[in-house]
Image (cartoon, coloured by chain):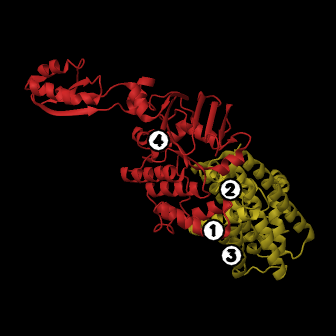
Protein backbone atom coordinates (compact mmCIF):
# COMPACT_ATOMS: atom_id res chain seq x y z
CA UNK A 1 0.00 0.00 0.00
CA UNK A 2 1.85 3.11 -1.17
CA UNK A 3 0.20 5.97 0.78
CA UNK A 4 -1.44 6.18 4.20
CA UNK A 5 -3.84 3.37 5.07
CA UNK A 6 -6.52 5.75 6.29
CA UNK A 7 -6.94 9.42 5.49
CA UNK A 8 -9.77 11.47 6.96
CA UNK A 9 -10.38 15.09 6.01
CA UNK A 10 -13.00 17.29 7.64
CA UNK A 11 -15.35 14.34 8.14
CA UNK A 12 -18.77 15.30 9.47
CA UNK A 13 -21.82 13.24 10.36
CA UNK A 14 -25.03 14.88 11.48
CA UNK A 15 -28.11 12.97 12.61
CA UNK A 16 -31.61 14.31 12.17
CA UNK A 17 -32.82 16.06 15.33
CA UNK A 18 -29.40 15.50 16.83
CA UNK A 19 -26.06 17.21 17.21
CA UNK A 20 -23.03 16.65 15.01
CA UNK A 21 -21.89 13.20 16.13
CA UNK A 22 -18.64 13.71 14.23
CA UNK A 23 -17.65 17.31 13.75
CA UNK A 24 -15.00 17.86 11.10
CA UNK A 25 -12.29 15.42 12.15
CA UNK A 26 -8.95 14.99 10.38
CA UNK A 27 -6.60 12.07 10.86
CA UNK A 28 -4.14 9.89 9.03
CA UNK A 29 -3.10 6.33 9.84
CA UNK A 30 0.05 4.75 8.37
CA UNK A 31 0.19 1.17 7.10
CA UNK A 32 1.01 -1.25 9.92
CA UNK A 33 0.15 1.28 12.62
CA UNK A 34 -2.21 0.69 15.53
CA UNK A 35 -4.26 3.84 15.90
CA UNK A 36 -6.18 4.13 19.15
CA UNK A 37 -9.33 6.24 18.98
CA UNK A 38 -10.03 7.10 22.59
CA UNK A 39 -13.07 8.81 24.00
CA UNK A 40 -16.09 8.41 26.25
CA UNK A 41 -19.41 6.95 25.13
CA UNK A 42 -21.17 9.31 22.77
CA UNK A 43 -17.95 11.02 21.70
CA UNK A 44 -18.33 9.95 18.05
CA UNK A 45 -16.01 6.93 17.92
CA UNK A 46 -18.51 4.39 16.62
CA UNK A 47 -20.04 6.85 14.18
CA UNK A 48 -16.57 7.42 12.74
CA UNK A 49 -16.01 3.67 12.41
CA UNK A 50 -19.39 3.19 10.72
CA UNK A 51 -18.46 5.87 8.18
CA UNK A 52 -14.97 4.49 7.54
CA UNK A 53 -16.36 0.98 7.07
CA UNK A 54 -18.92 2.36 4.54
CA UNK A 55 -21.94 1.47 6.69
CA UNK A 56 -22.92 5.10 7.22
CA UNK A 57 -22.54 7.84 4.63
CA UNK A 58 -20.85 11.00 5.90
CA UNK A 59 -22.73 14.28 5.85
CA UNK A 60 -19.67 16.07 4.49
CA UNK A 61 -15.92 15.77 4.27
CA UNK A 62 -14.00 12.93 2.71
CA UNK A 63 -12.06 9.87 3.72
CA UNK A 64 -10.15 7.09 2.04
CA UNK A 65 -9.45 3.66 3.41
CA UNK A 66 -6.85 1.46 1.74
CA UNK A 67 -6.56 4.13 -0.91
CA UNK A 68 -10.25 3.95 -1.79
CA UNK A 69 -12.82 6.68 -1.27
CA UNK A 70 -15.40 5.60 1.33
CA UNK A 71 -18.30 7.17 -0.57
CA UNK A 72 -17.51 6.38 -4.19
CA UNK A 73 -15.52 3.16 -3.87
CA UNK A 74 -17.37 1.43 -1.04
CA UNK A 75 -17.06 -2.09 -2.46
CA UNK A 76 -13.27 -1.76 -2.74
CA UNK A 77 -13.06 -0.37 0.79
CA UNK A 78 -15.05 -3.32 2.13
CA UNK A 79 -12.79 -5.76 0.29
CA UNK A 80 -9.75 -4.17 1.97
CA UNK A 81 -11.04 -4.11 5.52
CA UNK A 82 -12.09 -6.42 8.31
CA UNK A 83 -14.30 -5.11 11.07
CA UNK A 84 -15.39 -6.25 14.49
CA UNK A 85 -18.08 -3.76 15.39
CA UNK A 86 -19.12 -2.72 18.86
CA UNK A 87 -21.36 -5.62 19.78
CA UNK A 88 -20.12 -9.05 18.75
CA UNK A 89 -22.93 -9.71 16.28
CA UNK A 90 -23.05 -13.48 16.22
CA UNK A 91 -25.80 -16.02 15.69
CA UNK A 92 -26.30 -17.93 18.94
CA UNK A 93 -27.81 -20.87 17.05
CA UNK A 94 -24.78 -21.45 14.79
CA UNK A 95 -21.42 -22.93 15.77
CA UNK A 96 -18.15 -21.05 15.54
CA UNK A 97 -17.10 -23.07 12.50
CA UNK A 98 -20.43 -22.44 10.76
CA UNK A 99 -19.93 -18.70 11.25
CA UNK A 100 -16.51 -18.89 9.62
CA UNK A 101 -17.74 -20.99 6.72
CA UNK A 102 -20.62 -18.57 6.07
CA UNK A 103 -18.29 -15.59 6.20
CA UNK A 104 -15.72 -17.31 3.96
CA UNK A 105 -18.36 -18.13 1.37
CA UNK A 106 -19.76 -14.61 1.33
CA UNK A 107 -16.25 -13.16 1.09
CA UNK A 108 -15.65 -15.24 -2.03
CA UNK A 109 -12.96 -17.52 -0.56
CA UNK A 110 -12.65 -20.48 -2.98
CA UNK A 111 -14.51 -23.58 -1.80
CA UNK A 112 -11.34 -25.68 -1.68
CA UNK A 113 -9.64 -23.38 0.81
CA UNK A 114 -12.58 -22.43 3.03
CA UNK A 115 -12.17 -25.31 5.48
CA UNK A 116 -8.41 -24.72 5.76
CA UNK A 117 -8.92 -21.00 6.34
CA UNK A 118 -11.54 -21.69 9.02
CA UNK A 119 -9.16 -24.15 10.76
CA UNK A 120 -6.29 -21.63 10.65
CA UNK A 121 -8.41 -18.91 12.21
CA UNK A 122 -9.91 -21.17 14.86
CA UNK A 123 -6.37 -22.19 15.81
CA UNK A 124 -5.19 -18.58 15.86
CA UNK A 125 -7.94 -17.38 18.21
CA UNK A 126 -7.84 -20.50 20.37
CA UNK A 127 -11.30 -21.80 19.55
CA UNK A 128 -10.43 -25.20 18.07
CA UNK A 129 -12.09 -27.14 20.88
CA UNK A 130 -15.19 -24.95 20.86
CA UNK A 131 -15.43 -24.82 17.06
CA UNK A 132 -18.40 -27.14 16.79
CA UNK A 133 -20.27 -25.75 19.76
CA UNK A 134 -23.12 -23.28 19.35
CA UNK A 135 -22.04 -19.70 19.94
CA UNK A 136 -24.89 -19.22 22.42
CA UNK A 137 -22.77 -21.16 24.93
CA UNK A 138 -19.59 -19.11 24.38
CA UNK A 139 -18.22 -16.74 27.02
CA UNK A 140 -17.86 -13.04 26.23
CA UNK A 141 -14.15 -13.49 25.52
CA UNK A 142 -14.76 -16.41 23.17
CA UNK A 143 -17.37 -14.40 21.27
CA UNK A 144 -14.94 -11.52 20.86
CA UNK A 145 -12.23 -13.86 19.61
CA UNK A 146 -14.62 -15.41 17.10
CA UNK A 147 -15.65 -11.90 16.07
CA UNK A 148 -11.98 -11.12 15.41
CA UNK A 149 -11.52 -14.34 13.43
CA UNK A 150 -14.54 -13.46 11.28
CA UNK A 151 -13.05 -10.06 10.55
CA UNK A 152 -9.85 -11.75 9.36
CA UNK A 153 -11.42 -14.38 7.07
CA UNK A 154 -10.48 -12.61 3.82
CA UNK A 155 -7.05 -11.47 5.09
CA UNK A 156 -7.78 -7.74 5.06
CA UNK A 157 -4.98 -5.20 5.19
CA UNK A 158 -6.87 -2.88 7.55
CA UNK A 159 -8.73 -3.95 10.66
CA UNK A 160 -11.39 -1.88 12.46
CA UNK A 161 -12.06 -2.87 16.05
CA UNK A 162 -14.82 -0.97 17.78
CA UNK A 163 -14.41 -1.32 21.54
CA UNK A 164 -13.27 -4.91 21.19
CA UNK A 165 -12.73 -5.58 24.89
CA UNK A 166 -15.71 -3.84 26.45
CA UNK A 167 -17.18 -6.13 29.08
CA UNK A 168 -14.31 -8.64 29.02
CA UNK A 169 -12.37 -9.84 32.04
CA UNK A 170 -8.69 -8.93 32.33
CA UNK A 171 -7.45 -12.30 31.05
CA UNK A 172 -9.62 -12.20 27.92
CA UNK A 173 -8.72 -8.57 27.37
CA UNK A 174 -4.99 -9.27 27.56
CA UNK A 175 -5.29 -12.23 25.19
CA UNK A 176 -7.06 -10.05 22.64
CA UNK A 177 -4.44 -7.30 23.02
CA UNK A 178 -1.69 -9.84 22.31
CA UNK A 179 -3.41 -11.00 19.15
CA UNK A 180 -4.06 -7.46 17.90
CA UNK A 181 -0.44 -6.48 18.58
CA UNK A 182 0.75 -9.58 16.73
CA UNK A 183 -1.43 -8.78 13.71
CA UNK A 184 0.02 -5.29 13.47
CA UNK A 185 3.65 -5.99 14.31
CA UNK A 186 4.11 -9.42 12.69
CA UNK A 187 1.72 -9.19 9.76
CA UNK A 188 1.84 -5.46 9.10
CA UNK A 189 -1.90 -5.05 9.44
CA UNK A 190 -3.19 -1.53 10.05
CA UNK A 191 -5.48 -1.45 13.08
CA UNK A 192 -8.00 1.28 13.86
CA UNK A 193 -9.10 0.62 17.40
CA UNK A 194 -11.74 2.53 19.31
CA UNK A 195 -11.75 2.25 23.05
CA UNK A 196 -12.90 3.94 26.20
CA UNK A 197 -10.20 2.18 28.21
CA UNK A 198 -7.11 4.27 28.81
CA UNK A 199 -4.91 1.29 29.56
CA UNK A 200 -5.97 -0.31 26.28
CA UNK A 201 -4.94 2.69 24.22
CA UNK A 202 -1.77 3.02 26.27
CA UNK A 203 -0.80 -0.64 25.92
CA UNK A 204 -1.68 -1.16 22.27
CA UNK A 205 -1.70 2.01 20.26
CA UNK A 206 1.27 3.44 18.41
CA UNK A 207 -0.65 6.70 18.24
CA UNK A 208 -3.77 7.88 20.01
CA UNK A 209 -6.45 10.29 18.89
CA UNK A 210 -8.65 11.59 21.68
CA UNK A 211 -12.17 12.45 20.55
CA UNK A 212 -14.73 14.35 22.56
CA UNK A 213 -18.06 15.77 21.39
CA UNK A 214 -17.20 14.76 17.83
CA UNK A 215 -13.89 16.64 17.69
CA UNK A 216 -10.35 15.35 18.00
CA UNK A 217 -8.90 17.23 20.94
CA UNK A 218 -5.43 15.64 20.97
CA UNK A 219 -3.40 13.27 18.83
CA UNK A 220 0.11 11.83 19.24
CA UNK A 221 1.94 8.85 20.67
CA UNK A 222 0.80 7.98 24.20
CA UNK A 223 4.27 8.91 25.55
CA UNK A 224 4.29 12.33 23.90
CA UNK A 225 0.73 13.09 24.96
CA UNK A 226 1.59 12.28 28.55
CA UNK A 227 4.85 14.22 28.41
CA UNK A 228 2.91 17.22 27.14
CA UNK A 229 0.84 17.21 30.31
CA UNK A 230 3.80 17.59 32.61
CA UNK A 231 6.03 15.87 35.08
CA UNK A 232 5.19 12.97 37.38
CA UNK A 233 3.93 13.38 40.93
CA UNK A 234 4.86 11.61 44.16
CA UNK A 235 2.30 10.77 46.81
CA UNK A 236 3.78 10.43 50.30
CA UNK A 237 1.88 8.83 53.18
CA UNK A 238 3.46 9.72 56.55
CA UNK A 239 4.15 6.86 58.98
CA UNK A 240 3.07 9.20 61.79
CA UNK A 241 0.34 11.73 60.95
CA UNK A 242 1.91 14.14 63.44
CA UNK A 243 4.90 14.53 61.10
CA UNK A 244 2.67 15.71 58.24
CA UNK A 245 3.66 19.35 58.50
CA UNK A 246 7.37 18.51 58.66
CA UNK A 247 7.06 16.31 55.57
CA UNK A 248 5.14 19.07 53.79
CA UNK A 249 7.98 21.47 54.59
CA UNK A 250 10.59 18.99 53.28
CA UNK A 251 8.63 18.46 50.08
CA UNK A 252 8.35 22.21 49.67
CA UNK A 253 11.72 22.38 47.97
CA UNK A 254 10.23 20.49 44.97
CA UNK A 255 6.94 22.41 44.76
CA UNK A 256 3.75 23.13 46.65
CA UNK A 257 2.49 19.85 48.14
CA UNK A 258 -1.24 19.20 48.20
CA UNK A 259 -2.91 17.26 50.99
CA UNK A 260 -5.06 14.21 50.21
CA UNK A 261 -6.94 11.53 52.10
CA UNK A 262 -5.47 9.76 55.17
CA UNK A 263 -2.93 12.56 55.59
CA UNK A 264 -1.15 11.91 52.28
CA UNK A 265 0.82 14.66 50.54
CA UNK A 266 1.36 14.94 46.81
CA UNK A 267 4.03 16.97 45.09
CA UNK A 268 5.03 17.32 41.45
CA UNK A 269 8.63 16.53 40.45
CA UNK A 270 9.48 19.38 38.06
CA UNK A 271 12.55 17.59 36.64
CA UNK A 272 10.89 14.21 36.23
CA UNK A 273 11.21 10.88 38.00
CA UNK A 274 14.98 11.28 38.36
CA UNK A 275 14.22 13.54 41.32
CA UNK A 276 12.65 10.67 43.24
CA UNK A 277 15.98 9.61 44.73
CA UNK A 278 16.66 13.18 45.84
CA UNK A 279 13.22 13.36 47.49
CA UNK A 280 13.93 10.16 49.43
CA UNK A 281 17.30 11.57 50.56
CA UNK A 282 15.68 14.81 51.75
CA UNK A 283 13.12 12.92 53.84
CA UNK A 284 15.82 10.61 55.21
CA UNK A 285 18.15 13.48 56.17
CA UNK A 286 15.26 15.15 58.00
CA UNK A 287 14.64 11.90 59.91
CA UNK A 288 11.08 11.65 58.59
CA UNK A 289 9.55 8.19 58.19
CA UNK A 290 6.94 7.40 55.59
CA UNK A 291 4.44 4.54 55.42
CA UNK A 292 4.38 4.51 51.62
CA UNK A 293 5.57 6.48 48.65
CA UNK A 294 4.00 6.28 45.19
CA UNK A 295 5.29 7.68 41.93
CA UNK A 296 2.45 8.62 39.53
CA UNK A 297 3.30 9.02 35.88
CA UNK A 298 0.87 11.21 33.93
CA UNK A 299 -1.79 8.99 32.36
CA UNK A 300 -3.97 9.37 29.31
CA UNK A 301 -6.73 10.17 31.78
CA UNK A 302 -4.66 13.19 32.83
CA UNK A 303 -4.32 14.08 29.16
CA UNK A 304 -8.08 13.77 28.69
CA UNK A 305 -8.67 15.89 31.78
CA UNK A 306 -6.25 18.55 30.56
CA UNK A 307 -7.79 18.68 27.08
CA UNK A 308 -11.48 18.50 28.01
CA UNK A 309 -11.65 19.58 31.65
CA UNK A 310 -13.31 16.27 32.55
CA UNK A 311 -12.17 12.83 33.66
CA UNK A 312 -12.68 10.17 30.98
CA UNK A 313 -14.52 7.88 33.39
CA UNK A 314 -17.97 9.32 33.86
CA UNK A 315 -17.65 11.71 30.94
CA UNK A 316 -20.29 9.70 29.11
CA UNK A 317 -22.75 10.00 31.96
CA UNK A 318 -22.69 13.79 31.74
CA UNK A 319 -22.72 13.84 27.95
CA UNK A 320 -26.00 15.48 26.90
CA UNK A 321 -25.12 15.41 23.21
CA UNK A 322 -24.92 11.68 22.54
CA UNK A 323 -26.58 10.69 19.30
CA UNK A 324 -29.71 8.53 19.50
CA UNK A 325 -27.68 5.64 18.09
CA UNK A 326 -25.04 6.00 20.77
CA UNK A 327 -27.59 6.44 23.54
CA UNK A 328 -29.22 3.17 22.46
CA UNK A 329 -25.88 1.36 22.48
CA UNK A 330 -25.14 2.74 25.92
CA UNK A 331 -28.47 1.66 27.37
CA UNK A 332 -28.08 -1.77 25.77
CA UNK A 333 -24.71 -2.15 27.46
CA UNK A 334 -26.25 -1.14 30.76
CA UNK A 335 -29.01 -3.71 30.35
CA UNK A 336 -26.39 -6.33 29.54
CA UNK A 337 -24.45 -5.70 32.73
CA UNK B 1 -4.73 -11.29 -0.06
CA UNK B 2 -7.41 -8.75 -0.83
CA UNK B 3 -10.51 -10.10 -2.49
CA UNK B 4 -11.49 -7.77 -5.27
CA UNK B 5 -15.22 -7.12 -5.48
CA UNK B 6 -15.22 -8.71 -8.92
CA UNK B 7 -14.09 -11.99 -7.33
CA UNK B 8 -16.90 -12.01 -4.83
CA UNK B 9 -18.90 -15.23 -4.62
CA UNK B 10 -21.67 -15.74 -7.17
CA UNK B 11 -25.33 -15.09 -6.55
CA UNK B 12 -26.19 -18.77 -6.19
CA UNK B 13 -23.33 -19.40 -3.77
CA UNK B 14 -24.51 -16.45 -1.70
CA UNK B 15 -28.13 -17.62 -1.69
CA UNK B 16 -26.93 -21.12 -0.78
CA UNK B 17 -24.80 -19.89 2.13
CA UNK B 18 -27.50 -17.64 3.60
CA UNK B 19 -30.17 -20.26 2.92
CA UNK B 20 -28.14 -22.96 4.68
CA UNK B 21 -27.92 -20.73 7.73
CA UNK B 22 -31.64 -19.99 7.62
CA UNK B 23 -32.57 -23.68 7.33
CA UNK B 24 -30.09 -24.69 10.05
CA UNK B 25 -31.55 -22.08 12.37
CA UNK B 26 -35.09 -23.22 11.63
CA UNK B 27 -34.37 -26.90 12.21
CA UNK B 28 -32.46 -26.21 15.44
CA UNK B 29 -35.27 -24.16 16.96
CA UNK B 30 -37.78 -26.97 17.27
CA UNK B 31 -40.15 -25.00 19.47
CA UNK B 32 -40.54 -22.43 16.70
CA UNK B 33 -41.13 -25.24 14.25
CA UNK B 34 -43.55 -27.40 16.21
CA UNK B 35 -45.85 -25.04 18.13
CA UNK B 36 -46.85 -22.84 15.18
CA UNK B 37 -47.56 -26.10 13.34
CA UNK B 38 -49.65 -27.53 16.18
CA UNK B 39 -51.83 -24.46 16.75
CA UNK B 40 -53.66 -24.68 13.38
CA UNK B 41 -54.15 -28.41 13.93
CA UNK B 42 -55.71 -27.80 17.34
CA UNK B 43 -58.09 -25.22 15.83
CA UNK B 44 -58.85 -27.67 13.02
CA UNK B 45 -59.73 -30.37 15.54
CA UNK B 46 -61.90 -28.06 17.66
CA UNK B 47 -63.71 -26.24 14.87
CA UNK B 48 -64.05 -29.35 12.74
CA UNK B 49 -66.03 -30.92 15.52
CA UNK B 50 -67.77 -27.96 17.19
CA UNK B 51 -68.97 -26.27 14.02
CA UNK B 52 -69.97 -29.43 12.15
CA UNK B 53 -73.66 -28.41 12.35
CA UNK B 54 -72.82 -25.79 9.72
CA UNK B 55 -73.12 -28.53 7.10
CA UNK B 56 -76.90 -28.51 7.73
CA UNK B 57 -77.23 -24.92 6.52
CA UNK B 58 -79.06 -24.97 3.21
CA UNK B 59 -76.59 -24.39 0.38
CA UNK B 60 -73.59 -25.80 2.25
CA UNK B 61 -71.53 -28.09 -0.01
CA UNK B 62 -72.29 -31.81 0.44
CA UNK B 63 -69.05 -32.58 2.32
CA UNK B 64 -68.00 -32.95 5.95
CA UNK B 65 -67.13 -29.76 7.80
CA UNK B 66 -63.62 -31.13 8.34
CA UNK B 67 -63.14 -31.44 4.59
CA UNK B 68 -64.45 -27.88 4.17
CA UNK B 69 -62.13 -26.64 6.91
CA UNK B 70 -58.92 -28.41 5.84
CA UNK B 71 -57.65 -25.48 3.78
CA UNK B 72 -57.66 -23.22 6.84
CA UNK B 73 -54.66 -24.77 8.68
CA UNK B 74 -52.60 -24.27 5.52
CA UNK B 75 -53.53 -20.60 5.59
CA UNK B 76 -52.89 -20.22 9.33
CA UNK B 77 -49.53 -21.95 8.93
CA UNK B 78 -48.60 -19.47 6.21
CA UNK B 79 -49.43 -16.58 8.53
CA UNK B 80 -47.21 -18.06 11.23
CA UNK B 81 -44.40 -18.33 8.70
CA UNK B 82 -44.79 -14.62 7.94
CA UNK B 83 -44.14 -13.88 11.59
CA UNK B 84 -41.25 -16.29 12.16
CA UNK B 85 -39.48 -15.25 8.94
CA UNK B 86 -39.95 -11.58 9.83
CA UNK B 87 -38.76 -11.99 13.41
CA UNK B 88 -35.65 -13.88 12.26
CA UNK B 89 -34.70 -11.05 9.96
CA UNK B 90 -35.56 -8.34 12.50
CA UNK B 91 -33.40 -10.10 15.08
CA UNK B 92 -30.45 -9.99 12.67
CA UNK B 93 -30.97 -6.26 12.20
CA UNK B 94 -31.27 -5.62 15.93
CA UNK B 95 -28.25 -7.74 16.86
CA UNK B 96 -25.94 -6.18 14.25
CA UNK B 97 -25.57 -9.46 12.32
CA UNK B 98 -27.07 -7.63 9.36
CA UNK B 99 -24.16 -5.16 9.47
CA UNK B 100 -21.73 -8.07 9.47
CA UNK B 101 -23.37 -9.36 6.29
CA UNK B 102 -23.43 -5.85 4.84
CA UNK B 103 -19.64 -5.71 5.09
CA UNK B 104 -19.33 -8.67 2.74
CA UNK B 105 -20.02 -8.51 -1.01
CA UNK B 106 -23.44 -10.09 -0.34
CA UNK B 107 -26.19 -8.88 -2.68
CA UNK B 108 -29.47 -7.78 -1.12
CA UNK B 109 -31.52 -10.12 -3.31
CA UNK B 110 -29.36 -13.09 -2.26
CA UNK B 111 -29.80 -12.20 1.39
CA UNK B 112 -33.57 -11.96 0.99
CA UNK B 113 -33.89 -15.22 -0.95
CA UNK B 114 -31.58 -17.04 1.46
CA UNK B 115 -33.35 -15.70 4.54
CA UNK B 116 -36.69 -16.95 3.23
CA UNK B 117 -35.32 -20.44 2.62
CA UNK B 118 -35.98 -21.41 6.24
CA UNK B 119 -39.59 -20.32 5.86
CA UNK B 120 -39.97 -22.44 2.72
CA UNK B 121 -38.64 -25.51 4.55
CA UNK B 122 -41.20 -24.97 7.32
CA UNK B 123 -43.90 -24.46 4.70
CA UNK B 124 -43.08 -27.78 3.03
CA UNK B 125 -42.99 -29.65 6.34
CA UNK B 126 -46.20 -28.20 7.72
CA UNK B 127 -48.12 -28.55 4.46
CA UNK B 128 -47.29 -32.25 4.31
CA UNK B 129 -48.29 -32.66 7.98
CA UNK B 130 -51.61 -30.83 7.49
CA UNK B 131 -52.42 -32.94 4.46
CA UNK B 132 -51.60 -36.20 6.23
CA UNK B 133 -53.56 -35.20 9.34
CA UNK B 134 -56.54 -34.28 7.16
CA UNK B 135 -56.44 -37.63 5.40
CA UNK B 136 -56.04 -39.41 8.75
CA UNK B 137 -59.11 -37.51 10.00
CA UNK B 138 -61.13 -39.01 7.17
CA UNK B 139 -60.97 -36.18 4.66
CA UNK B 140 -60.80 -37.38 1.08
CA UNK B 141 -59.04 -35.28 -1.54
CA UNK B 142 -61.58 -34.89 -4.33
CA UNK B 143 -58.93 -34.06 -6.93
CA UNK B 144 -56.91 -37.17 -6.12
CA UNK B 145 -53.16 -37.55 -5.70
CA UNK B 146 -52.40 -34.98 -8.36
CA UNK B 147 -54.67 -32.51 -6.63
CA UNK B 148 -52.96 -33.19 -3.31
CA UNK B 149 -49.62 -32.30 -4.92
CA UNK B 150 -51.10 -29.12 -6.42
CA UNK B 151 -52.50 -28.28 -2.98
CA UNK B 152 -48.98 -28.59 -1.53
CA UNK B 153 -47.55 -26.36 -4.26
CA UNK B 154 -50.23 -23.71 -3.76
CA UNK B 155 -49.86 -23.72 0.02
CA UNK B 156 -46.06 -23.39 -0.23
CA UNK B 157 -46.47 -20.53 -2.70
CA UNK B 158 -48.85 -18.77 -0.29
CA UNK B 159 -46.45 -19.34 2.61
CA UNK B 160 -43.58 -17.93 0.53
CA UNK B 161 -45.66 -14.83 -0.23
CA UNK B 162 -46.50 -14.30 3.44
CA UNK B 163 -42.86 -14.89 4.40
CA UNK B 164 -42.11 -12.00 2.05
CA UNK B 165 -44.67 -9.88 3.93
CA UNK B 166 -42.96 -10.73 7.23
CA UNK B 167 -39.56 -9.88 5.75
CA UNK B 168 -40.91 -6.60 4.38
CA UNK B 169 -42.22 -5.54 7.79
CA UNK B 170 -38.95 -6.56 9.44
CA UNK B 171 -36.88 -4.62 6.92
CA UNK B 172 -39.04 -1.52 7.12
CA UNK B 173 -39.27 -1.48 10.91
CA UNK B 174 -36.03 -3.22 11.93
CA UNK B 175 -37.92 -4.44 14.96
CA UNK B 176 -39.05 -7.90 16.06
CA UNK B 177 -41.77 -6.31 18.18
CA UNK B 178 -43.22 -4.60 15.11
CA UNK B 179 -43.37 -7.94 13.29
CA UNK B 180 -45.11 -9.56 16.24
CA UNK B 181 -47.54 -6.66 16.49
CA UNK B 182 -48.64 -7.17 12.90
CA UNK B 183 -49.57 -10.81 13.52
CA UNK B 184 -53.08 -10.15 14.94
CA UNK B 185 -53.82 -7.95 11.93
CA UNK B 186 -52.82 -10.76 9.57
CA UNK B 187 -55.10 -13.10 11.48
CA UNK B 188 -58.01 -10.69 11.14
CA UNK B 189 -57.74 -11.04 7.36
CA UNK B 190 -58.27 -14.77 7.87
CA UNK B 191 -61.35 -14.30 10.04
CA UNK B 192 -62.82 -11.78 7.57
CA UNK B 193 -62.74 -14.31 4.76
CA UNK B 194 -64.63 -17.40 3.67
CA UNK B 195 -62.59 -19.51 6.09
CA UNK B 196 -65.61 -20.69 8.14
CA UNK B 197 -68.45 -20.63 5.64
CA UNK B 198 -68.85 -20.45 1.87
CA UNK B 199 -69.22 -16.82 0.78
CA UNK B 200 -72.82 -17.20 -0.46
CA UNK B 201 -73.79 -18.29 3.06
CA UNK B 202 -72.34 -15.22 4.76
CA UNK B 203 -75.68 -13.51 5.43
CA UNK B 204 -74.40 -10.34 7.10
CA UNK B 205 -73.92 -8.01 4.16
CA UNK B 206 -70.81 -6.13 5.31
CA UNK B 207 -69.08 -9.43 6.21
CA UNK B 208 -70.03 -10.85 2.83
CA UNK B 209 -68.66 -7.76 1.07
CA UNK B 210 -65.40 -7.76 3.03
CA UNK B 211 -64.89 -11.48 2.41
CA UNK B 212 -65.54 -10.94 -1.30
CA UNK B 213 -62.89 -8.22 -1.52
CA UNK B 214 -60.48 -10.08 0.78
CA UNK B 215 -57.84 -11.93 -1.29
CA UNK B 216 -57.42 -14.44 1.53
CA UNK B 217 -60.87 -15.82 0.60
CA UNK B 218 -59.61 -16.74 -2.85
CA UNK B 219 -56.41 -18.29 -1.51
CA UNK B 220 -58.47 -20.50 0.79
CA UNK B 221 -61.08 -21.27 -1.88
CA UNK B 222 -58.34 -22.30 -4.31
CA UNK B 223 -56.96 -24.83 -1.84
CA UNK B 224 -60.43 -25.86 -0.68
CA UNK B 225 -61.62 -26.58 -4.19
CA UNK B 226 -58.96 -29.26 -4.57
CA UNK B 227 -60.21 -30.96 -1.39
CA UNK B 228 -63.97 -30.76 -1.77
CA UNK B 229 -64.75 -30.08 -5.46
CA UNK B 230 -62.05 -31.66 -7.59
CA UNK B 231 -60.48 -29.73 -10.45
CA UNK B 232 -62.14 -26.31 -10.46
CA UNK B 233 -60.32 -24.15 -12.99
CA UNK B 234 -61.78 -20.84 -11.85
CA UNK B 235 -61.07 -21.37 -8.15
CA UNK B 236 -57.54 -22.56 -8.93
CA UNK B 237 -56.87 -19.67 -11.28
CA UNK B 238 -58.00 -17.20 -8.62
CA UNK B 239 -56.03 -19.01 -5.91
CA UNK B 240 -52.81 -19.22 -7.89
CA UNK B 241 -53.33 -15.72 -9.29
CA UNK B 242 -53.62 -14.11 -5.87
CA UNK B 243 -50.80 -16.27 -4.48
CA UNK B 244 -48.49 -15.23 -7.32
CA UNK B 245 -49.52 -11.60 -6.91
CA UNK B 246 -48.75 -11.85 -3.19
CA UNK B 247 -45.32 -13.36 -3.90
CA UNK B 248 -44.45 -10.78 -6.55
CA UNK B 249 -45.67 -7.76 -4.60
CA UNK B 250 -44.23 -8.77 -1.22
CA UNK B 251 -40.85 -9.82 -2.63
CA UNK B 252 -40.56 -6.75 -4.84
CA UNK B 253 -41.27 -4.44 -1.92
CA UNK B 254 -39.00 -6.49 0.37
CA UNK B 255 -36.23 -6.31 -2.22
CA UNK B 256 -36.52 -2.52 -2.32
CA UNK B 257 -36.59 -2.42 1.48
CA UNK B 258 -33.49 -4.61 1.79
CA UNK B 259 -31.57 -2.31 -0.54
CA UNK B 260 -32.50 0.64 1.65
CA UNK B 261 -31.64 -1.31 4.78
CA UNK B 262 -28.28 -2.52 3.44
CA UNK B 263 -26.92 1.00 3.69
CA UNK B 264 -23.53 0.81 2.08
CA UNK B 265 -21.77 3.50 0.18
In front: mark 3 or mark 2?
A: 2
> x, y percentage for residue B250?
78, 54
Q: CA distance from mark 4 to mark 2?
A: 27 Å
Which chain does tag 3 point to? B
| SS type, badge 2 | loop
* Same subunit, tags 4 and 2: no
- Residue B202 shows up from this direction: no
> x, y percentage for residue A278?
19, 27
| SS type, badge 4 | loop
Q: Are marks 1 and 2 in contact (CB under 8 Å)?
A: no
* Same subunit, tags 3 and 1: no
Q: Which residue in the protein does label 4 denote?
A: A205
Q: Residues within 10 Å of mark 4 (few under 14, many from 20)?
A: many
Q: Which residue in the protein does label 2 denote?
A: B3
Q: Quadrant of residue A104?
A: bottom right
Chain identifier matching the yellow colour in the rendered picture: B
Q: Residues within 10 Å of mark 2 (few under 14, many from 20)?
A: some
* Same subunit, tags 4 and 3: no
Q: Residue at x 84, y 67 (%)?
A: B222
Comparing A10 with B75, the one in front is A10
> x, y percentage for residue B117?
70, 65
The answer to which of marks 4 and 1 sits earlier in the sequence is: 1
Q: Which residue in the protein does label 1 denote?
A: A113
Q: CA distance from mark 4 to mark 1?
A: 33 Å
> x, y percentage for residue A54?
66, 43
Q: Which residue in the protein does label 3 denote?
A: B129
Q: Are marks 3 and 1 in contact (CB under 8 Å)?
A: no
Chain identifier matching the red colour in the rendered picture: A
Amino acid sequence: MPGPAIVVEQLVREFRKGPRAVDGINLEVSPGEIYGFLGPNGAGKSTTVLMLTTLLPPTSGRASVGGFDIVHEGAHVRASIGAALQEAALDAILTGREHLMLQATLQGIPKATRVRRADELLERVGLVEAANRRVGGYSGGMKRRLDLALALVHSPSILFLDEPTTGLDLQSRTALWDEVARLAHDEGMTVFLTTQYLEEADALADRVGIIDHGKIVAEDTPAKLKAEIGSPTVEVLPADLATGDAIAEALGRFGSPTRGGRGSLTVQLPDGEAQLAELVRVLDQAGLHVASLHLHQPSLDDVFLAKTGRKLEGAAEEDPDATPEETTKRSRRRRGR
Amino acid sequence: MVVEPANASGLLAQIGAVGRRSITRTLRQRALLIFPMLFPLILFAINGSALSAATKIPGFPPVSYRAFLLAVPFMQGALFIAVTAGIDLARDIESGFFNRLALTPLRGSALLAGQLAGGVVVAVLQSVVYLLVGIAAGVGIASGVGGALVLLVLSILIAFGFAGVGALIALRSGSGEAVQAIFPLLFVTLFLSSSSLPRPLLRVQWFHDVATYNPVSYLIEGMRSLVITGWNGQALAMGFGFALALVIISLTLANIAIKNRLVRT
